[in-house]
Image (spheres, helix red, strand yellow):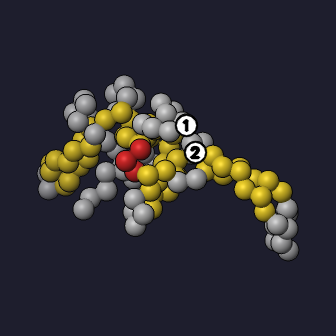
């Protein structure tokens, strides 16, 4: 199956504590159906000191389930569903909301 959300896409969070916020996809985990979005779903982790790393409390992004994010429409930035169309022998992702082709 073709990926509807890819690394580098702008997405809108649909549910949870960050509902309505947008961010760029940093990582896609297709086996778990999850994505990591920049600045969204941040958690604090306490780490022990190692020879290569200092001890402390670090903030990082945790993954979100793909069903909780939607691609941002290239035209107006609102959430949209993704469709596919074949043009000149190449498959393209298309925003259902505006019909715009999604880059990437």
Which of the numbered marks, if any, corresponds to residue 28? none
The residue nearer to you, when weighing 43 against 54, is: 43
Which of the numbered marks, if any, corresponds to residue 41? 2
Residue drawn at 42 percent across, 36 percent down = 14
Q: Is there any visible trace of residue 3 in the rendered image?
A: yes
| Residue 91 left/right relative to 75 | left
Relative vertical location of residue 31 with respect to residue 28 in this rendering, above or below: below
Q: Are marks 2 and 1 in contact (CB under 8 Å)?
A: yes
| Classed neighbour count for the residue bearing mark 2: other residues with Cα under 10 Å, few (<14), some (14–19), many (≥20) | some
Image coords of residue 91 (percent x, y): 20, 53
Element under disc 1: loop
The residue nearer to you, when weighing 51 against 103, is: 51
Quarter of the image for the N terminus: give it: bottom left
| Residue 5 left/right relative to 54 | left
Residue reaching furthest to the front: 16
Q: Is there any visible trace of residue 101 in the rendered image?
A: no
Image coords of residue 78 (percent x, y): 37, 29
Point out the tag, 2 or 1, that comes first from the N-terminus.
1
Q: Which residue is mark 1?
A: 17
| Residue 56 left/right relative to 70 | right
Residue drawn at 41 percent across, 43 percent down = 69
CA separation, marks 2 and 1?
A: 8 Å
Q: Quadrant of residue 29?
A: bottom left
Residue reaching furthest to the bottom: 51
The residue nearer to you, when weighing 86 against 36, is: 36
Residue drawn at 52 percent across, 47 percent down = 37
């Amino acid at each position: 199956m073709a990926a509807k959300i890819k690394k580098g896409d702008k997405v809108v969070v649909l549910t949870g504590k960050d509902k309505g916020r947008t961010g760029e996809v940093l990582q896609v985990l297709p086996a778990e159906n999850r994505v990591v979005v920049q600045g969204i779903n941040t958690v604090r982790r306490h780490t022990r000191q190692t020879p290569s790393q200092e001890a402390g409390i670090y903030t990082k992004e945790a993954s979100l389930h793909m069903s909780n994010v939607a691609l941002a429409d290239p035209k107006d930035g609102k959430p949209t569903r993704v469709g596919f169309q074949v043009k000149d022998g190449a498959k393209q992702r298309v925003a259902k909301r505006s019909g715009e082709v999604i880059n990437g």
